[in-house]
Amino acid sequence: MKHFTSVNQLTKEEVYSLLEMAEALKGNPLPLQKQLFVANLFYEPSTRTKMSFTVAERKLGMEILDFHQDSSSAAKGETLYDTAKTFESIGADMLVIRHASDSWMQELQNGISIPILNAGAGKAEHPTQCMLDLLTIYQEFGSFRGLQITIAGDIKHSRVAKSNADALSRLGAIVSFSAAPEFMEASHPYPYISMDEAARSSDIVMLLRIQHERHCDEGDYVDYLERYGLTKEREKQMLPHAIIMHPAPVNRNVEIDASLVECERSRIFKQMKNGVYIRMAIIKKTLGEWGKLNETTIEKRQKAIISI
């Protein structure tokens, strides 16, 4: 894999390999044995993804070249490509990028000669979020085949919905969407069901927030929770083993009742914890494939941590 831009570029075997590597790294981070620099280029606000990458990079012993759009040359009109090329030129070994454009990867991937990790592309892709969600589900159920999974919320504007639905379907899960009419996206090949049906039939209810920043009409969402969200009444109808997921940030009492965010079914904060380890695994795998680590050493250490 040249750049990590989409889960779709991974085979099923590679997905499972990354999940197993992340599990092994939880108890044994094994920092990299050489100095490597990584630049985190975040052009959109982020708490979980940016800080998760930062912790993952520090656990691996990497030197972080941070970036703040407002105080960078981007404020003077510098393009994403020229910023990326600048960091490559001064010695960055890897770029982690989040940008509002759906297709920024195409602009960069042929002109940049260091690995790029996609930390979010507009409404199109969020592959590392997808991988941490897969890790959370894998820990809970041990498999994806046959799981009934409903992704509910602002489907139209969500990069998480697309990345997760495609990956989960490919791994054998049965994916449905649930959304208010204005948040449906007809181009996705997944059926829409009501939230009542989602609550009764799903092994996993994966909620999404309303992404106000991606559409102009603020709308009136006073009764959104009762009509389209996960209320306490709907949670009581869920299957005994069913879990609740959410990529966050959470709009409490909008897509989910506030009392359910940390309830027994919720895996929301577990997802965040898993984000550190899956991103460590992705970083190590990508650096290894680019020959930026001693491959023989990587193979030995990988066998060691998996055998623990």
Image (tube, helix red, strand yellow):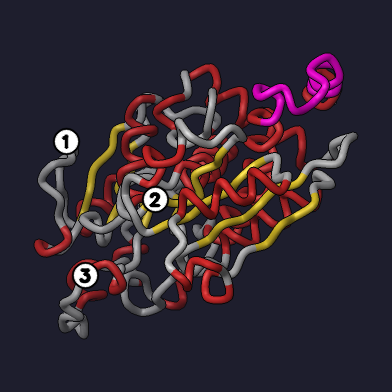
Amino acid residing under circle 2: Ala
Amino acid residing under circle 1: Pro
The x, y position of residue 269, in whole percent, is 59, 61
CA separation in Å, label 1 and label 3? 22 Å
Residue 189 is tagged as: 1
Numbered disc in front, either 1 or 3: 3
Check disc 2 and report its element: helix, strand or loop. strand
Residue beneath label 2, please? 121
Q: Is residue 28 visible?
A: no
Figure check: 12 above or below 46: above
Kindly indicate the quadrant of the structure image that contains residue 65.
bottom right
Numbered disc in front, either 2 or 1: 2
Q: Which residues are magenta?
A: 287-302
CA separation in Å, label 2 and label 3? 16 Å
> Residue drawn at (60%, 35%), measured in percent from left and top?
115
Which of 15/33 is in front?
Answer: 33
Which of 222/130 is in front?
Answer: 130
Q: Crowding near pointer 3: few (<14 within 10 Å), some, many (20+)?
A: few
Check disc 1 and report its element: helix, strand or loop. loop
Image quadrant containing the N terminus = top right
**Predominant SS of the magenta segment:** helix
Residue beneath label 3, please? 215
Which of 17/5 is in front?
Answer: 5
Residue 158 left/right relative to 37: left
Check if mark 2's residue and mark 1's residue have beta carbons within 8 Å. no
> Residue drawn at (19%, 59%), measured in percent from left and top?
179
